[in-house]
Amino acid sequence: MNTKIIIAGVGGQGILLASDILCEVAMKSGLDAKKSEVHGMSQRGGDVVSHVIFGDKVYSPLISYEEADVILAFEQVEALRNLDYLKSDGVIIVNKAKILPVPVASGLADYPKDPIGEVKKFAKNTIVIDAEEIAKELGNSRVMNVVLLGVMAKNVRSIDKNIWIETLKESVPQKTIDVNVKAFERGYSYS
């Protein structure tokens, strides 16, 4: 049986690194893994979505509506935007971060009043975390994505935690290994 995960957020949040690490972890676990990415003006704060599927045999990296086991949303509205992909017993992990898209920042559109509240109405397994605050506590706001990876790893029990940490150490710059491992551990222990 394949595991299907969507990682969604805004350009610059580390979505692509997170999906690369996820695929590498799956392959190191002896699984087939494929991913597909959509970069919507990611350099300018546009949405970025990565579909990752891993298991015994994966034929396509694309996830259809109501198929995702996990949605990892780096931003509140991105959680709402991708909610249709979550299967009824799936888990959605939502970072509390709010990043205003250009139309909202320029006054041409409104940011939804309570995106997390809307997500909770439709997803019975919702985990909300302030990963940005945890990253700041660790002294490096750029490890927010790794905090979120830790939460996801805890909810993807088919992969050994040690493989996650080993792959993380190989994927980040040498000088940031310690803070990234701490960030992963904080996310992994988040309840």
Image: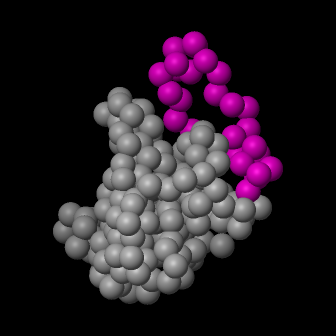
Residue 145: x %, y % from top left: 43, 57
In-front residue for pair 177/116: 116
> How did the renderer colour the structure?
one colour
Image x and y of residue 64, in percent: 55, 53
Magenta region: 94-123
Q: Residue at x 58, y 46 (%)?
A: 82
Q: Is any part of residue 9 visible from this angle?
A: yes
In this image, 44 relative to 3: left or right? left
Q: Quadrant of the C terminus?
A: bottom right
> Which residue is painted at 53% across and 29% down in the image?
100
Seen in the image, is 106 located left or right of residue 58?
A: right
* Rendering coords of residue 8 (x, y %): 48, 49
Left or right of 53 on screen, residue 175: left
Q: Outermost residue, right direction? A: 121
Above or below for 7 versus 150: above
Q: Residue at x 39, y 61 (%)?
A: 60
- Is residue 56 magenta-colored? no
